[in-house]
C-alpha cells in the first residue's frame, strides 16, 4: 500500500463523494500541500456539493488533519490572511460564499488568486 492509498482510505472512511475519483483528488491535493514549496504553482481545491449541509466542512476538517500547516478560516480579514499566506500555510477557507463582497473580501480573493 502506498501513501496515496492510505490517504484515499482515510477519506473513504469518513466522506462520501459524487464519484470515486474525488477521493483520489483529495488524497493527491493533501499530499501536494507537503510539496508545494517545490512548485511554481499550486492548484486550488474547490469543494462543492449538490445540496446544502452535504459535508463540505467535514471535508475541510479532514483536510486540516492531513495537510501541511493547515489554517481553517470561516472569515478572513485581509491582514490575517496575508500573514498566513506569507508563512506558507495551507488555507482551508470555509463558507466563503457567505462572506459578502466588501473590500476586505475582494482583497482576500485577490491574495488567494495571486497564489
Image (spheres, helix red, strand yellow):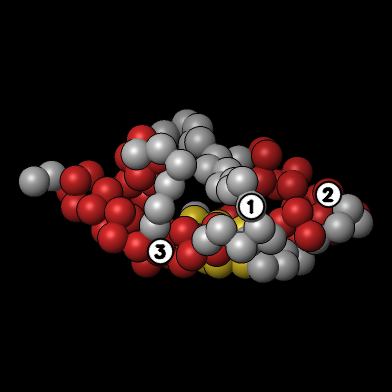
Which mark is nearer the camera, 1 or 2? 1
Callout 1: few (<14), some (14-19), or many (20+) C-alpha neighbours within 10 Å? few
Residue furthest toward the top?
40
Q: Position of residue 82 (x, y in %)?
A: 67, 58
Q: To which residue does mark 1 refer?
A: 51
Q: Find the distance from the CA under tag 2 to the CA under tag 3.
A: 27 Å
Residue furthest toward the right?
102
Q: Are marks 1 and 2 in contact (CB under 8 Å)?
A: no
Q: Earlier in the sequence, mark 1 or mark 3?
A: 1
Q: Is residue 52 above or below residue 50?
A: below
- One can see residue 71 in this view: yes
Q: Position of residue 91 (x, y in %)?
A: 55, 57
Write down the quadrant of residue 11 in the picture: bottom left
Instruction: Compare residues 36 and 59 and report the one nearer the observer.
Output: 59
Q: Position of residue 29 (x, y in %)?
A: 40, 43
Q: Earlier in the sequence, mark 1 or mark 2?
A: 1
Q: Find the distance from the CA under tag 1 to the CA under tag 2.
A: 26 Å
Q: To which residue does mark 2 refer?
A: 106
Instruction: Say the numbered circle drawn on residue 62.
Output: 3
Q: Position of residue 111 (x, y in %)?
A: 70, 47
Q: Is residue 30 above or below residue 40?
A: below
- One can see residue 29 in this view: no
Element at label 3? helix
Residue shown at 62%/58% (left/top)? Answer: 93
Element at label 1? loop
Q: Quadrant of the C terminus?
A: top right
Does residue 19 appear to the left or right of 75 in the view shown? Answer: left
Instruction: Compare residues 18 and 109 and report the one nearer the observer.
Output: 18
Callout 2: few (<14), some (14-19), or many (20+) C-alpha neighbours within 10 Å? some
Residue shown at 51%/36% (left/top)? Answer: 43
Callout 3: few (<14), some (14-19), or many (20+) C-alpha neighbours within 10 Å? some
Amino acid at each position: 500500500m502506498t501513501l496515496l492509498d492510505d490517504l484515499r482510505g482515510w477519506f473513504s472512511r469518513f466522506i462520501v463523494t459524487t464519484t470515486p475519483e474525488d477521493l483520489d483528488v483529495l488524497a493527491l491535493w493533501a499530499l501536494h500541500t507537503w510539496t508545494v514549496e517545490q512548485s511554481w504553482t499550486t492548484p486550488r481545491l474547490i469543494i462543492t456539493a449538490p445540496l446544502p449541509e452535504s459535508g463540505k466542512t467535514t471535508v475541510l476538517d479532514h483536510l486540516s488533519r492531513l495537510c501541511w500547516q493547515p489554517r481553517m478560516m470561516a472569515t478572513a480579514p485581509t491582514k490575517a490572511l496575508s500573514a498566513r499566506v506569507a508563512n506558507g500555510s495551507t488555507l482551508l477557507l470555509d463558507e466563503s460564499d457567505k462572506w459578502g463582497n466588501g473590500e476586505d473580501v475582494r482583497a482576500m480573493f485577490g491574495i488567494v488568486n495571486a497564489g
